[in-house]
């Protein structure tokens, strides 16, 4: 059940409603368009602005989302040229709400409302800034980011209260804000909010003549909010009184309002242990929401019904409803996103790398200085003692001088040897990085990007990909240990993967052959965890084999972000000979994004040894609007750097992101953009 503006039909249309009352939508649009045409020719700016916004509200309230998108740019330009700023921002709000409720493009809605706020801020228009914060609160509420939603609503109230005349949408702002505080169980703050709300309503009634229907709608939601606060603080007497008052103002034809009242009345009856009355209210509510496309309201209704049946000791029926709830849970996204993300600042990253090199150089010079200083201190002490006993210690002083000279020679040799080793390691690092692909596919249907950052000069992580005709092979691996031994094992594993993939073998067969090779003469007991996949670019099928590696994250365009479930458990490659590795298949991965990584990501530690964690990984991927694979990898690189807070890396870090879309899908996406 899509929750439209609660007072939009009664208030937002204004004068237009009186002209289209009791008409069909086609007749109403014909009437409104005729008046828009007439006012355009007569130059009546105020009337033209009212009817332009009224037409947009008519589109929105009748779910004509295509008409909203088609008319919004031209209407906004017209209102901007007329400098009719209130109607200008109201039309913009209709566009944002269309993205939220009808098009399900919540990330686009967030970007749009931020542009709206920036526009109002540039013009120093309090009405526009207040409406933008109000709309931003609705966007965050639908993104399940209740903290940001509450902050946005409060900022909107703070701005709008400075205006001499209360905007007509202020009651809506209070109502949505109250819902958020109720969802956060901030009942005392909700109760305080109702006091300000009551004052606002009385002021609005004085400033704007309202019909009885308009009056009832405004006071209905105020009384509902008072009932919410009373329920939350177990003030049952006040809750009963406020909900009873709300019912007197309820219009039965408004299904959403009826369902809202039944919900809170049933909650009150449950808290009073009057379960049979609660069940009757819930049954009426369930009948109204059963066929609703938005299953969120239906899920909340059967959850309430299960609690009521449990109170009536009808446990078997309650258990059946809980099973139904679990079945619905996977189809409803718990959280689409949490706020707008910061993009990667490449210059900042480069500066951080330069600073890290300077810090390393400083530590090295400090180490050399300490050695030289210590040697000089020893020398000075010996010289002081020798001066006091010059005659009897001449031979000892001579011997000490020779030893000190040898120390200097050894120190000089050590410095040169260290520089030689560091030079060799730099060459080894360049060779190792040269083994990894640095160029990625430039195709319309395949987007792939990867990076590897070793914790030491050389590392044991690897990634690779090959495009062979209509097959895309890719892998990510993590060799046990670090440094030169891990790097050598990594190079051998990379070579084996490439040579076997060129034979167009299945990933599980590649794993078998690599295991046979790497277990031979493996006296150090090294092994590598790997995830390897093969995508058929004709059919979209992906075969993969996970050899003891972290499960990748799968990102769907219309679903939640989650770890890929593994049905087969395979050991790392190189541990035991003659193992048979099992592969798995996903029938169609078109339109899906896979993010594969090593444990240097989720186990990255800061100075307090707190790990980055799986939950933070999923949270960032969930709230990151997908632009391309490189953006995903670089966003997580920045997040890890911020989490470490200049702490030394505790492990190699490798990430690979791949997304496959058919040419048809790519063309469709391009046209929609």
Image (cartoon, grey):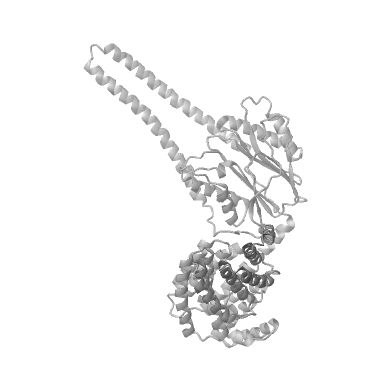
Query: Where residue 355 sits: x, y (%)?
Result: 45, 43
Between residue 273 and residue 618, name the one nearer to us: 273
Whether residue 49 is visible here, answered yes or no, is no
Residue drawn where x is 54% and y is 57% of the image: 341
Quadrant (top left/top right/bottom left/bottom right) for the N terminus: bottom right
Residue depicted at x 74% and y 41%: 583
Q: How many marks?
A: 0
Residue 100 visible in the displayed image: yes
Q: Is residue 414 left or right of residue 101?
A: left
Q: Is 130 above or below relative to 23?
A: above
Compared to residue 444, the image places residue 275 above or below, namely: below
Instruction: Please say if 250 is above or below 561.
Output: below
Q: Which of 118 and 257 is in front in this view?
A: 257
From what the image shows, is residue 655 above or below residue 426? Answer: below
Quadrant of residue 62 within the rendered picture: bottom right
Q: In this view, does 510 lie to the left or right of 42?
A: right
Quadrant in the rendering for residue 557:
bottom right
Could you say which is closer to the camera, residue 563 or residue 183? 183
Most foreground residue, 450 or 244? 244
């Amino acid at each position: 059940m899509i929750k439209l503006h609660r007072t939009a039909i009664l208030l937002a249309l204004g004068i237009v409603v009186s002209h289209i009352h009791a008409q069909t939508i086609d007749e109403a649009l014909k009437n409104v368009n005729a008046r828009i045409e007439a006012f355009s020719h007569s130059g009546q700016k105020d009337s033209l602005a009212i009817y332009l916004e009224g037409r947009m509200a008519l589109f929105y309230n009748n779910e004509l989302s295509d008409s909203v998108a088609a008319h919004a740019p031209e209407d906004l330009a017209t209102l901007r040229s007329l400098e009719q700023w209130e109607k200008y921002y109201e039309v913009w709000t209709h566009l944002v709400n269309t993205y939220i409720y009808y098009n399900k493009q919540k990330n686009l809605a967030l970007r749009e409302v931020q542009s709206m706020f920036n526009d109002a801020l540039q013009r120093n228009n309090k009405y526009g800034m207040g409406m933008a914060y109000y709309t931003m609160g609705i966007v965050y509420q639908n993104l399940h980011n209740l903290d940001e939603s509450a902050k946005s609503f409060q900022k909107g109230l703070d701005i709008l209260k400075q205006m001499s005349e209360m905007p007509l949408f202020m009651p809506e702002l209070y109502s949505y804000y109250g819902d958020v505080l109720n969802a956060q169980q901030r009942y005392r703050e909700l109760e305080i909010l109702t006091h300000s709300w009551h004052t606002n309503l009385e002021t609005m009634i004085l400033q704007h003549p309202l019909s009885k229907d308009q009056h009832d709608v405004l006071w209905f939601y105020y009384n509902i909010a008072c009932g919410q606060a009373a329920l939350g603080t177990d003030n049952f007497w006040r809750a009963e009184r406020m909900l009873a008052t709300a019912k007197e103002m309820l219009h039965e034809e408004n299904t959403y309002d009826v369902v809202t009242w039944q919900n809170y009345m049933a909650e009150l009856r449950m808290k009073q242990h009057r379960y049979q009355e609660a069940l009757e209210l819930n049954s009426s509510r369930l009948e109204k929401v059963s066929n609703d496309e938005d299953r969120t309201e239906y899920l909340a209704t059967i959850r309430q019904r299960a609690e009521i049946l449990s109170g009536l000791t009808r446990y078997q029926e309650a258990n059946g409803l809980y099973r139904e709830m679990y079945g619905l849970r996977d189809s409803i996204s718990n959280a689409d996103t949490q706020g707008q993300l910061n993009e990667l600042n490449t210059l900042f990253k480069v500066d951080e790398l330069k600073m890290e090199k300077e810090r390393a150089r400083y530590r090295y010079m400090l180490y050399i200085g300490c050695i030289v200083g210590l040697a000089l201190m020893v020398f000075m002490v010996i010289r002081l003692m020798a001066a006091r006993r010059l005659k009897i210690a001449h031979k000892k002083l001579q011997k000490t001088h020779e030893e000190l000279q040898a120390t200097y020679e050894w120190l000089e040799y050590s410095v040169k040897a260290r520089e030689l080793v560091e030079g060799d390691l730099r060459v080894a690092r360049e060779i190792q990085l040269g083994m990894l692909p640095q160029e990625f596919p430039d195709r319309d249907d395949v987007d792939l990007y990867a990076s590897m950052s070793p914790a030491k000069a050389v590392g044991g992580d690897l990634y690779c990909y090959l495009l062979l005709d209509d097959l895309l092979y890719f892998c990510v691996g993590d060799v046990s240990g670090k440094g030169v031994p891990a790097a050598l094992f990594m190079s051998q594993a990379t070579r084996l993967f490439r040579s076997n993939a060129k034979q167009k073998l299945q990933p599980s067969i590649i794993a078998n052959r690599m295991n046979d090779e790497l277990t031979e003469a493996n006296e150090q007991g090294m092994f590598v965890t790997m995830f390897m996949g093969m995508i058929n670019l004709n059919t979209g099928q992906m075969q993969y084999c996970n050899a003891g590696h972290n499960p990748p994250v799968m990102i769907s365009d219309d679903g939640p972000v989650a770890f890929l479930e593994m049905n087969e458990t395979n050991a790392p490659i190189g541990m035991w000979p003659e193992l048979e590795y099992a592969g798995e298949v996903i029938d169609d991965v078109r339109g899906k994004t896979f993010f594969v990584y090593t444990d240097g990501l989720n186990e990255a530690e800061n100075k307090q040894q707190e790990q980055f964690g799986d939950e933070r990984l999923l949270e960032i991927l969930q709230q990151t609007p997908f632009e391309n694979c490189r953006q995903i990898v670089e966003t997580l690189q920045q997040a890890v750097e911020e989490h470490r807070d200049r702490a030394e890396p505790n492990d190699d870090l490798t990430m690979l992101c791949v997304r496959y879309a058919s040419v048809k899908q790519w063309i469709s996406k391009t046209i929609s953009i």
